[in-house]
Image (spheres, helix red, strand yellow):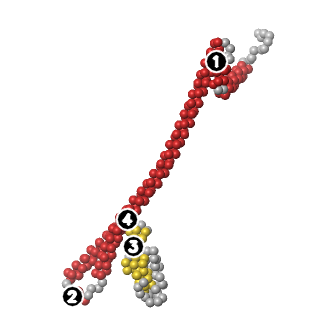
Amino acid sequence: MASGAGTPAPTAEQAPTLGGAVSAIKQSLLARFAAYLDSLDEHELEGIAATAKGPNEASDLASVFVELAALRGDVRTQSRLVKEALEQFRSVFDTLQVSHASMDQELKRVRTEAGEKQRELLKPLLLDIIDIRDRLSTAIAQASAGPPWFEWLLPKAFWDARTSSREGIGMIVRRLDRVLAHRGVVPTDTVGRVFNPRIAAAVATVVRQGMPDGHVVEEVRPGFLWNDELLRPAEVIVVKHEGKEGST
């Protein structure tokens, strides 16, 4: 059946296209209206509400604009509160970082002072142990030396007791060496090396063929290092070919 005069009705294929266009126009208008409302302040909104036509229309528009103004005020308030909260959090975070750094420095200082104090208290004890070790080592060296002629006349029991005593003293010395090593105390190595005044003191010089000048030929008293730091210098005899030998 033919359609009436005027604009022809849209076909079935054109209906969805027109509907989508109308929907897009509506969304565009709503977005522009929302942007326009956001750009207005409260006084402008009240002026628009006052100029609306009709009492009912004016009342409805005024209510809408008042609600919009209140909503925008709430949004601004919330934004300000969030910003303040972020600033407070940043301030607290900075304070915590500074406090953490200060605490680390304080802990390092306390540990350093505690280590130095412990070292001051332990050093005399270690030196006393080393002195006892020196005396026992001297006793072993004397017992190992050849006895006087008259001691050969003594009975075998004497020689057995002397041997047992020397072995017992040797065990004590080895035990003291383990104790010192456990504390990081080790003897210096000077014999056969170039004389090093940082870890040794020359108590005498001697002419020794086959060894160059300035080399340690004998260690009178051993030196010790404590955790790679000098605890007690060694007393040594150094080779010197020029001039006469003697004490320095």
What residue would you read off at disc 4?
120
Nearer to us of marks 4 and 2 is 4
Q: CA distance from mark 3 to mark 1?
A: 98 Å
Q: Position of residue 179 (x, y in %)?
A: 34, 67
Disc number at residue 61? 1
Q: Which residue is mark 3?
A: 232
Please state the horizontal and vertical placement of residue 96, each as a whole percent of the image. Answer: 49, 46
- Which mark is on residue 153? 2
Which badge, 2 or 3, comes first in the chain's sequence? 2
Q: Is residue 208 above or below residue 178?
A: below
Q: In the picture, residue 155 is in which quadrant?
A: bottom left
Q: CA distance from mark 2 to mark 3?
A: 42 Å
Where disc 2 sits, the SS reads helix
- Mark 1 to mark 2 CA distance (whole Å): 135 Å
SS for dot 3: strand
Distance, label 3 to label 4, CA atoms, is 14 Å
- Going from N to C along the chain, the mark reached first, 1 or 2, is 1
Q: Is residue 217 in view? A: no
Whether tag 3 and tag 1 are in contact, CB under 8 A, the answer is no
The reply, left or right, for residue 219 in relation to residue 90 is left
Q: Disc 4 residue type?
A: Glu
Report the residue at 42% width, 67% height from top: 227
Say which residue appears at 33% left-offset and 73% top-offset: 131
